[in-house]
Image (tube, grey):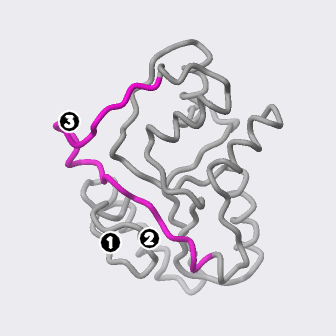
Amino acid sequence: MVFSGNNPVYKEEAIPHPVNYYGFTKLQAEKTVLSYKKGIVLRIALVYGFSSSANKNFFEKTVENLKSGNEIESYIDQYRTPISLKSLISNIITIWQSNKYGLFHLSGGTRISRYDMNLKIAEYMGADKSLIIPVVLKKLPVSRLYPMDLSLSSLKANNTFGLKEESIDEGLEFYFKNGI
C-alpha cells in the first residue's frame, strides 16, 4: 500500500505515494531494510489461501461466509493482482536461496476486483453467487483512505528468479480440487 492506486500496474521503479498512515509506515520500513547491503523487500498486493493463523484472511472469511450462507459485500472498483499462499511461499524460498537482494514485487497473473474474485471463489466452491453483493468503494466516505488499484507487476522478480505468475484460476483450482 505504498502506492496511491492511481497509476497501476505498478513496477518496482514506480515512485511510491502512500495515501494513508499504514502505507507511509510501510514505505519507511522499506527504506530502512533497503539501506542494508543484504536487504530484501517483497511487495505483495494481496495473498489468498488457507493459513494456520488464528486471524482469518479475506479469502478464508469469504469461504466461511459462503459456507454459512452469509452475504458478503465486495468492492467492484478495488483491484489487486492476488497471489496464492502456495505460490508466495515457493517464491520466497526461491528468492531467499538466490542470495540476490533488493526490491521485488510478487503478484499473481490476474488483475481482478475483490467482487470478481469473490464470485470466482463462490464458483469454485459451488456456492450461491447471489451472496456476493457489489459495493462501490468510491461512493463511501472512507474511499480516500484506500488505494483503488494496487495491481503489481512481478516481471522483474519473474525474470530475475525464473518465477511464473499463477493465474487466479490456477490458484483456486489448486485449493478447491485438492480439498485444502
Q: CA distance from mark 3 to mark 2?
A: 30 Å
Decide which of 121, 3 is in the foreground and name it: 121
Q: CA distance from mark 1 to mark 2?
A: 11 Å
Q: Earlier in the sequence, mark 3 or mark 1?
A: 1
Is label 3 or label 2 in front?
Answer: 3
Q: Is residue 116 above or below residue 40?
A: above
Amino acid type assigned to the residue bearing label 1 in the image: Pro
* Magenta region includes residue 133: yes
Residue labelled with disc 3: 140
Q: State the mark number for residue 30.
A: 2
Residue 155 picture quarter:
bottom right
Q: State the mark number for residue 112.
A: none
Residue at 70% x, 36% y: name it. Answer: 52
Decide which of 29, 102 is in the foreground and name it: 102
Number of marks in the rendered image: 3
Kind of element beneath mark 1: loop
Amino acid type assigned to the residue bearing label 2 in the image: Glu
Q: State the mark number for residue 16.
A: 1
Residue 148: x %, y % from top left: 31, 52
Residue 55 picture quarter:
top right
Amino acid type assigned to the residue bearing label 3 in the image: Leu
Q: CA distance from mark 3 to mark 1?
A: 24 Å
Q: Is residue 6 left or right of residue 96?
A: left
